Amino acid sequence: MELPEINIQRKTGIEEFYLNNKKLNFQLNEFWIWNQSNLIENRTRGILAEYIVKEALGIKDGLRIEWDSYDLMTNEGKKIEIKSASYIQSWKQEKYSNIQFGIAKTVGEPSNPEYDGIFKRWSDYYIFCLLGEKDQKIINPMNLNQWTFYILKTKTINKKLKNQKTIGLNSLLKLNPIECKFDELKTIII
């Protein structure tokens, strides 16, 4: 049996839950608040980094696709892979986290018109997003001054790192990425 792709509609957050055709006393935005208020946690911070870059690049409406071949496509058609890291985690730490980003090749998504079943890096650019604040008392992922972005062409990663699956910050810096802040991202990528 083959099931077609579901056309997901953008939600507003005020959608209500139902039981036996009766509205219940909670809404979708309450789930979002419950599920995603910890913006420092790795999974949520990674998705937040994608959203921050989306906004910086002025990418029009759309919905995030969890397992797509790349994370974002600019309005001009450039494919972007977003990676995120932070020194501070929301759990108890003995020391700062080592900054490391995943860069492994993937087989891609069969719905991608370029899909060929071969493991590769599908994007044109990688944007490595570092939440660099080291003070637990003031860390705030919504303060975009606390983020630094490193931009690198995917072909540079392919040429220099071949099949490497991760890269640390020092190794990344040796590749001479473009380092910038939030308000510089669009100018650099476009």
Image: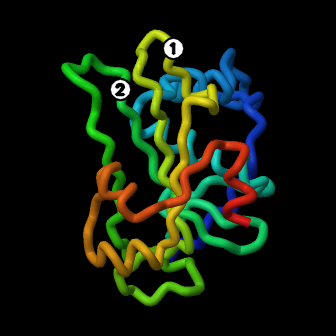
Per the image, label 2 sits on a secondary structure element best described as loop
Q: Nearer the viewer, residue 110 or 146?
A: 146
Residue farthest to the left, as pictured: 94
| Residue located at (69% from left, 24% from top) | 27
Q: Quadrant of residue 77?
A: bottom right
Placement of 171 over or under 16, stated as above or below = below
- Asked if residue 95 is positioned above or below residue 149 in the image, the reply reads above
**Residue 106 vertical placement versus 170 (above, below):** below
Residue at 36% in and 31% down:
87
**As drawn, which residue projects farthest toward the bottom?**
116
Mark 2 is on which residue type? Gln
Q: Quadrant of the C terminus?
A: bottom right
| Marked residue nearer the N-terminal end (2 or 1) | 2
Q: Nearer the viewer, residue 30 or 152?
A: 152
Q: Which residue is mark 1?
A: 138
User: Is residue 48 in sight in this rendering?
Assistant: yes
Total numbered badges shown on the rendered structure: 2
Image spot of residue 93 (x, y percent): 24, 20
Q: Quadrant of residue 13?
A: top right
Q: Position of residue 36 (x, y in %)?
A: 53, 28
Answer with the quarter of the image where residue 160 lies. Answer: bottom left
Badge 2: few (under 14), some or many (20 or more) residues near its Cα, within 10 Å?
Answer: some
The amino acid type, in three-letter code, at marker 1 is Ile
**Front residue of 32 and 92:** 92
Q: Which residue is labeled 2 in the image? A: 89
